[in-house]
Amino acid sequence: MKKKIQIQEKEPQYSVTTGITFAQVDAWFGHTRQDLKLDLIYPEDKTKKYPCIVWICGGAWLLMDRSAHLAYLCELARNGFVVASVEYRTSNEAQLPAQIQDVKAAIRYLRAHAERYNIDTDRFGVMGESAGGYLTCMAALDNDPSLDVGEWLEYSSEVQAACPWYPPTDFRGFPYPSEEACASSPESLLLGKNAMRYMDEALKYCPVSLVTKDAPPFLIIHGNEDHTVPFAQGVLLHDLLEEAGCDVTLLEIDGSDHADIPFFQKKLWEQIKEFFAEKLK
């Protein structure tokens, strides 16, 4: 059997490039250098510029894999976005604010190379899960110039929309029975000191301390049966943003636990696509 069809060219070709070095940072007690890398999905289309979404993987700041969710990120990209999944140093490699600096370095790199990858430099969104949700909030809320270090400093690291999934937003909100129990917690390792014992310092690195009326639009996604990052953490950030007069929506996933399978269903990703399409238009 033979068949012949005609195909009308309506969509661009999308390409995936993995392992792009966007920054170099000190490693091994300052004696060596470490590459930080990103994976990128972009349209081969020079006729227009596309909004860019930066994805940040979770893992309690202890582990991360920038390629773990590429299957889903590719589907998001094919709805009209450039999507970058970025690496950051884990808490055994560096303490705060290194992780925030890494994410901001990736954003600056992408703006610096916008022409190559057909990116609209005025339309950047950021999204991440759990530890990556925390970094999403910090990238969106903390624009302290001291966080911009390294290369491409002539470019902005600010974003125009944020979608954190089940984010830790207030380190005081985790129910440890004692300071001793908190000492080895993910947030204490990230901070480099006991988050309960140094609560005032820890709070300075919490999204709830950085809310202003100038925050970009937020879509916070959180399961109401989360046993890792309490649902109240997402609610608290939502309420503070709303009180400040910001554009914010809390999408409550009924019955869902942390990183649960509902977060990887098409229905939720449609909500994400619609959010970024509206806020980055």
Image (tube, rainbow, N blue to C red):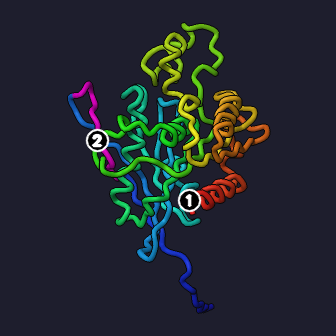
Which residue sits at x=54%, y=76%? 11
Could you say which is closer to the camera, residue 41 or residue 133? 133
What residue is rendered at 49% in x and 27% in y?
A: 205
Q: Looking at the image, which residue sits at the far right? A: 254
Identify which amino acid the numbered label 1 is placed on. Answer: Leu
Helix, strand or loop for disc 2: loop
**What residue would you read off at disc 2?**
150
Residue 95 occupies quadrant: top left
In the picture, the quarter occupied by the N terminus is: bottom right
Q: Residue, x 48% and y 73% (percent of image)? A: 13
Q: Is residue 212 left or right of residue 37?
A: right
Pick the front one: 261 or 154: 154
On screen, residue 180 above or below 267? above
Nearest-to-viewer mark from 2 and 1: 1
Any mark on residue 244, and which?
Answer: none
Q: Which mark is residue 280?
A: 1
Where in the figure is residue 149, as x and y percent of width and height?
A: 31, 39
Q: Which residues are magenta?
A: 20-30
Query: Residue at 57% of width from left, 23% of height from top?
Result: 171
Prevailing secondary structure of the magenta residues: strand
Q: CA distance from mark 2 to mark 1?
A: 27 Å
Q: Quadrant of the C terminus?
A: bottom right
Q: Considering the numbered disc 1 on the image, is that residue within a helix, a strand or a loop? A: loop
- Number of other residues with Cα within 10 Å of mark 2, as a class: few under 14, some 14 to 19, many 20 or more: some
